[in-house]
């Protein structure tokens, strides 16, 4: 701590913030992230049953609790015989992010990730919470909506997608219950179904944590998101990662079970490519992004930031979708 402060002692406040941002994992960086997390927790606390519109607290609680733990292949459009080709969370309903609704609390499988991620993004990269205001945000892989609601508390519009239908339905229900459905829309859709004109140059920020390593074609995903951004738009990516200097990815694929067994509803990670910070950087560059920064984060994660400076082309040779813009 003393060492960091003595190195920074001559800096102006703005330089100080920049120098702090450049020092990964420093004590000051951590306390900046904690300060922002507190701010975000306060913003998120508006989503309590006392602020529900058009539904009673009891009905709301019942509607949510009745889903948790349910198993329903049908709603997802696959049969019982295909369960071994689905992830556990697509089969069984699990709550995603922690949420204190006031009358009741839910602990999610992802804990407070929604708060911590956003606070890390704005601590590590040249973007602030203010940069979300009045913006159109694309939230990819929203699970039960912790991140979607948080972004909605900051931004003008949020468009969220989720490939698992039951979770997309939940997020629509939350958004309607809190009367923000005029600004937030949710669709049960894969990111790979967002490669069409209706998505081109539509968003200011593509918010993309916790998904890229679940995708079989990360480069295509990044290109779809590049195309979905307006010129000047920003992507924020977070992923499981490997901590090596080289531009390497580890390949796990769907047959590796990190925890649990196949018989236990596919508790496998379904992680495909797991990038090092340099590999993520190279993939983002290939997809068209500029001003890229990637950063290793403890607990085996990597963060990335990039800007769409212009609508440049992508190399078409060997591309999985040759007709992509
Ligand atoms: C680990 S969770 C991350 C949730 C949230 N974005 C976060 O970072 O806290 C990944 C989510 O992405 C969804 N997902 C996976 N592949 C997807 C795809 N191709 N299109 C849309 N959503 C997808 C999963 O169903 C899951 O809800």
Image (spheres, grey):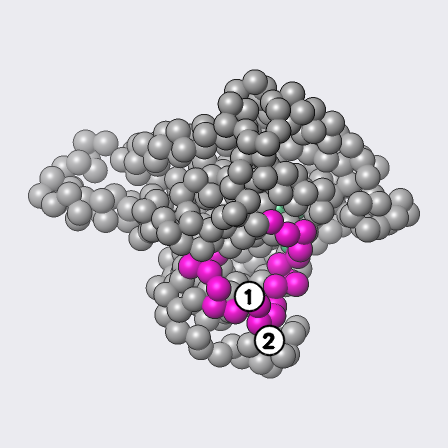
Q: Is residue 194 magenta?
A: yes
The answer, for residue 185, to whether it is visible in the render is: yes
Given the current orientation, which residue lies at the most extreme left position?
A: 10
Packing grade of label 1 (10 A; few <14, some 14-19, many >=20) is some
Mark 1: which secondary structure? helix
The single residue placed furthest to the right in the displayed view is: 81
- Residue 324 — which label? 2
Q: Quadrant of the C terminus?
A: bottom right
In three-dimensional space, the C-alpha distance between marks 1 and 2, rounded to whole angstroms, equals: 12 Å
Q: Identify the residue position indicated by label 1 in the image.
A: 199
Residue drawn at x 43%, y 66% is 230
Residue 98 placement, left or right of 270: left
Residue 283 visible, this angle: no
* Residue nearest the viewer, comparing 190 with 81: 190
27 on left or right of 104 = left
Residue under the point 68% across and 34% down: 94
Question: Residue 127: where, in percent of width, then height?
Answer: 33, 51
| Spot occupied by residue 166 in the image (x, y as percentages of width and height) | 71, 42
Give the residue displayed 58% in from the left and 45% down from the top: 142
Please tell me whether residue 155 is drawn above or below residue 275 in the rendered image: above
Dot 2: element:
loop
Percent of width and height locating residue 222: 53, 63
Q: Earlier in the sequence, mark 1 or mark 2?
A: 1
- Please identify the quadrant where the N terminus is shown: top left
- What are the residue bounds of the magenta stretch? 186-206
């Amino acid at each position: 701590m003393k060492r960091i402060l003595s190195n920074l002692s001559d800096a102006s406040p703005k330089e100080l913030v920049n120098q702090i941002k450049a020092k990964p994992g420093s004590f000051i960086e951590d306390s900046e992230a904690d300060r922002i997390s507190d701010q975000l927790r306060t913003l998120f606390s508006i989503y309590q049953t006392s602020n529900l519109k058009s539904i009673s607290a009891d009905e709301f609680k019942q509607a949510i609790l009745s889903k948790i733990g349910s198993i329903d292949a049908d709603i997802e459009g696959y049969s019982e015989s295909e369960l071994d080709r689905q992830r556990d969370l697509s089969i069984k309903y699990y709550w995603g992010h922690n949420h204190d609704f006031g009358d009741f609390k839910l602990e999610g499988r992802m804990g407070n990730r929604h708060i911590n991620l956003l606070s890390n993004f704005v601590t590590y990269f040249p973007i602030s919470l203010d940069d979300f205001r009045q913006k159109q945000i694309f939230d990819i892989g929203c699970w039960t909506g912790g991140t979607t609601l948080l972004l909605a508390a900051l931004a003008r519009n949020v468009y969220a997608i989720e490939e698992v239908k039951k979770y997309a339905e939940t997020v629509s229900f939350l958004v309607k219950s809190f009367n923000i459905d005029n600004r937030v829309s949710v669709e049960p859709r894969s990111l790979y179904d967002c490669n069409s004109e209706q998505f081109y140059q539509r968003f200011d920020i593509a918010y993309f944590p916790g998904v890229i390593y679940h995708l079989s074609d990360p480069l295509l995903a990044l290109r779809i998101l590049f195309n979905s951004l307006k010129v000047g738009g920003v992507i924020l990516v977070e992923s499981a990662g490997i901590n090596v200097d080289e531009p390497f990815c580890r390949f796990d694929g769907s047959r590796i079970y990190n925890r649990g067994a196949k018989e236990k509803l596919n508790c496998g990670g379904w992680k495909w490519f797991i990038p090092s910070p340099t590999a993520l950087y190279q993939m983002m560059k290939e997809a068209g992004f500029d001003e890229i920064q990637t950063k290793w984060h403890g607990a085996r994660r990597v963060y990335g930031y990039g800007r769409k400076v212009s609508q440049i082309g992508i190399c078409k040779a060997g591309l999985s979708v040759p007709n992509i813009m």
